[in-house]
Image: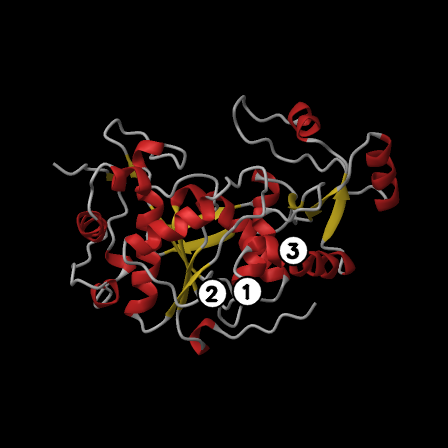
Amino acid sequence: MQYTVASAMDLLPRGRFAPTPSGALHVGSARTALASALSAWSAGGRWVLRVEDLDAVRAAPGATAAMLDDLRWLGLDWDEGPGVGGPSAPYAQRERAPLYAATLDWLRARGLVYPCACSRRDIELASQAPHGAEPVYPGTCRDLAPDAVVARARSLGRGVSWRFRTDPEAPPVVVRDLLRGVSSQQVHREVGDFVVMRADGVASYQLAVVVDDVAMDITEVVRGDDLLASTPRQVLLYEALGAAPPAWAHLPLVLGGDGERLAKRSGSMGIAALRERGVSAGWLRGWLLESLGARDQGALRASAEGFSLAAVDASPVVWRAPG
């Protein structure tokens, strides 16, 4: 597979919002969507909506349609995406599986990935990580013959996953974030070789998000700071594919009055639930804009004028209910 990717300097800014339809769209997700849109529009760019619905287990029935309805209710309209179309269609990941499979084949042909027969339980048992910490993959299948790994998996009634081969001698991956500053991670030591294709044949988040952002020429990724730790893995995949990573901006999460994050499955903080309680789109839009340091100028595209992600407060935001 050959990726031909223009430099970010050669493209109009292209931002994106890529939610997973696993529950109601909540205030924190709406804030991320708004920040991404304002940033793209403020620079004369385009804003793309992509639905990350690869995981059929997590995807809730009707969640995608409800999410799109909530975004429109807030006044957000996307330049490309579901119901609008665009040059990078389709905009639902379930329809993009052939692209992920082709990318895996490309990585396999270059020896950048290898099959793994280990289950999650196998890795937990082999890990020396403290209780509760994410176990580091110990490299069990890294140097085994691929045919032997496949045979072992079959004997156990499993398929094989595919892991990206990280370099133990590589320097830490440095991430420069517009909000969080500079961070680094030695991926081999801190994560290990990571999954890019699951044993059930579904692409991992790490692979799918990079492949899609490259294919859609995304130049800026705005998302919650709970995803910052996965960014170095994605940088390695960009490098492997010969593509330039986007600019990163990881927004602080929105917290409830109790100091806990507004979980996606917290129905009381869902946009639909707020609507049912009589919260107006105008009030909520104003609160979100204020939390981002933006001026409410009526239409959201007008409110993008003068907006800068660099001016957004990097501290967590506490949700304040109306009244």
**Residue 1 appears in the rendering:** yes
Residue density around tag 3, few if under 14, some if 14–19, many if 20 or more, within 10 Å: some
* Residue, disc 1: 214
Q: Nearer the viewer, residue 29 or 176?
A: 29
At numbered mark 1, what does the secondary structure look like: helix, strand or loop?
Answer: helix
Q: Nearer the viewer, residue 191 or 54?
A: 54
The answer to whether marks 1 and 3 mark residues whose Cβ atoms lie closer than 8 Å is no
Residue beneath the point at 49% across and 74% down: 7
Q: Which amino acid, by three-letter code, is at mark 3?
A: Ala
Q: Which amino acid, by three-letter code, is at mark 1?
A: Val
* Relative image position of residue 33 (x, y in whole percent): 35, 53
Q: Which amino acid, by three-letter code, is at mark 2?
A: Ile
* Residue, disc 3: 97
Q: Residue furthest left?
A: 323
Q: Nearer the viewer, residue 262 or 170?
A: 262
The answer to whether marks 2 and 3 mark residues whose Cβ atoms lie closer than 8 Å is no
At numbered mark 3, what does the secondary structure look like: helix, strand or loop?
Answer: helix
| Mark linked to residue 186 | none
Of badges 1 and 3, the one in the foreground is: 3
* Relative image position of residue 11 (x, y in whole percent): 44, 75
Kindly report the distance in space between the C-alpha atoms of the residues bearing marks 1 and 3.
15 Å
* Relative image position of residue 246 (x, y in whole percent): 46, 62
* Residue, disc 2: 218
At numbered mark 2, what does the secondary structure look like: helix, strand or loop?
Answer: loop
Kindly report the distance in space between the C-alpha atoms of the residues bearing marks 2 and 3.
19 Å
**Residue 180 appears in the rendering:** no
Residue density around tag 2, few if under 14, some if 14–19, many if 20 or more, within 10 Å: many
* Relative image position of residue 260 (x, y in whole percent): 32, 29
Please tell me whether residue 295 is drawn above or below residue 60 in the rendered image: below
